[in-house]
């Protein structure tokens, strides 16, 4: 562990969508320090125009994800001592998304794909109806619960090589949401969801290598959700349901 | 790039292929371990409807499976339009079918 007098050698990506480069900074190493603390220190003390995104600082909002030494991380909950290599950090904008400036990426393609995957609630009743009981123990509810704690951080999307290879691929987070809704007793969008995820770029584009699961900071497994979608879509195809 | 039909075709061809692969490996081990000569092998395969069906089916499912698999690899490796992609897939499938079925014909025709 670096002592208080030591410093970290940090390179940070600076630039817009067209061009950019890494710039190096020496940042005081502290005993307890997150990657987001390091970025904030640089912005406050060395590079006031550095752009980056964060809000909650406690792993709730999903806005602070960046590439740290080549791997996607939620920076507010990533301790420097766990990821620094010989006191070095390389901090870059999230992979697979267009850069706006410095460490801030455009999240639109990520969220557009949630909608494209029908990762939106499909209501079947109106406000006058009684509240439908949801039993926590049903297999469908257990499957939905397993994927529900997503904070939309796009770490999995950045980790996914299938997204990198195929820009049309909906990606792990959107498909994970589609799967939780498919298993939600209150959601009536089964046909729309299965249509959406069966198209080219849908669940069949997943290679099942599991980078999403490996990197999801909330320890969700989009891989498992996507396997579920593949199973449902395949049965539907065989039964020729519509 | 990979619609549901192609996806299912690739899964189902894999399902058929898996036992055939094991059968093929068993045959290879038997033929080599037992020291069968080419003439002895041909003596058993020529005129055999069983071997013709076994390896004929094998060739058909391999051609389908490989063509779809290579199609995905190509589409994810280089940017390519739908038509060239379809032509490529068909060329792979028909090429493998031609080579495989010629080989099956050569060893099983009497
Ligand atoms: S398992 Fe599928 S969704 Fe997850 S990273 Fe791999 S290709 Fe992407
Ligand atoms: S599935 Fe995990 S990694 Fe992906 S967006 Fe949700 S919380 Fe982030
Ligand atoms: S700042 Fe909210 S999750 Fe990191």
Image (tube, coloured by chain):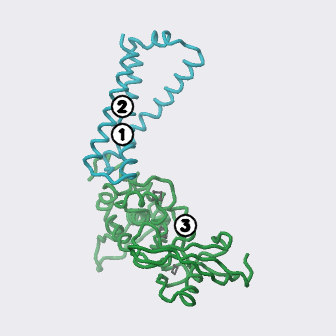
Chain colours: A green, B cyan
Percent coordinates x, y for residue A28 in the rendering: 66, 84
The quadrant of the picture occupied by the N terminus of chain A is bottom right
What chain letter is assigned to the residue under label 2?
B
Assign a secondary structure to mark 1.
Answer: helix
Q: Which residue: 38% across, 70% down?
A: A110
Q: Is residue A23 above or below residue B63?
A: below
Q: Which quadrant of the figure has residue B47?
A: top left
Which label's residue is closer to the chain start, 2 or 1? Answer: 1
Q: Work out whether residue A215 or residue A82 is closer to the camera in this orientation and state it.
A: A82
Q: Which residue: 56% across, 19% down?
A: B30
Residue indicated by mark 3: A71
Percent coordinates x, y for residue B33 in the rendering: 60, 19
Q: Which residue: 31% across, 64% down?
A: A189
What chain letter is assigned to the residue under label 3?
A
Q: Seen in the image, is A164 located left or right of residue A11? A: left
Assign a secondary structure to mark 3.
Answer: strand
Crowding at dot 1, Cα within 10 Å, few <14 / some 14-19 / many 20+, comes out as: many
Q: CB atoms at circles 2 and 1 under 8 Å apart?
A: yes
Q: Which residue: 61% across, 79% down?
A: A34
Percent coordinates x, y for residue A126 in the rendering: 28, 76
Residue indicated by mark 1: B67
Residue indicated by mark 2: B96
Q: Which quadrant of the figure has residue A20?
A: bottom left
The answer to whether dots 1 and 3 both sit on one chain is no
Mark on residue B53?
A: none
Q: Which quadrant of the figure has residue A197?
A: bottom left
The answer to whether dots 2 and 3 both sit on one chain is no
Assign a secondary structure to mark 2.
Answer: helix
| Alpha carbon separation for disc pair 1 and 3 | 34 Å
């Amino acid at each position: 562990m670096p002592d208080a007098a030591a410093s970290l050698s940090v390179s940070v990506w600076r630039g817009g969508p067209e061009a950019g480069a890494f710039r190096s900074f020496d940042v005081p190493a502290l005993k307890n320090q997150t990657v987001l603390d390091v970025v904030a220190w640089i912005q406050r003390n060395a590079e006031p125009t550095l752009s980056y995104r964060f809000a909650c600082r406690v792993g709730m909002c999903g806005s602070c994800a960046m590439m740290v030494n080549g791997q996607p991380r939620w920076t507010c909950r990533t301790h420097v001592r766990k990821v620094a290599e010989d006191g070095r950090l390389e901090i870059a904008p999230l992979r697979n998304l267009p850069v706006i400036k410095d460490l801030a990426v455009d999240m639109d393609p990520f969220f557009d794909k949630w909608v494209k995957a029908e990762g939106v609630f499909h209501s079947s009743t109106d406000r006058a109806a009684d509240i439908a009981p949801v039993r926590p123990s049903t297999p469908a509810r257990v499957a939905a619960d397993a994927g529900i704690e997503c904070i939309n951080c796009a770490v999995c999307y950045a980790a996914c090589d299938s997204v990198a290879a195929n820009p049309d691929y909906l990606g792990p987070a959107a498909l994970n949401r589609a799967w939780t809704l498919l298993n939600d007793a209150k959601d009536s969008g089964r046909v729309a969801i299965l249509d959406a995820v069966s198209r080219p770029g849908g669940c069949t584009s997943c290679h099942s290598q599991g980078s999403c699961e490996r990197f999801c900071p909330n320890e969700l497994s989009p891989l498992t959700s996507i396997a579920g979608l593949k199973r449902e879509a395949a049965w539907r195809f065989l039964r020729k349901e519509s | 790039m990979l619609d549901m039909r192609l996806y299912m075709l690739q899964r189902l061809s894999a399902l058929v292929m898996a036992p055939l692969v094991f059968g093929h490996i068993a045959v290879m081990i038997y033929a080599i371990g037992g020291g069968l000569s080419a003439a002895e092998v041909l003596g058993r395969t020529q005129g055999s409807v069983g071997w013709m069906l076994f390896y004929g089916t094998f060739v058909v499912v391999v051609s389908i499976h490989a063509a779809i698999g290579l199609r995905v690899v190509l589409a994810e490796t280089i940017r390519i339009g739908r038509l060239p992609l379809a032509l490529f897939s068909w060329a792979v499938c028909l090429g493998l079918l031609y080579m495989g079925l010629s080989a099956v014909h050569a060893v099983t025709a009497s």
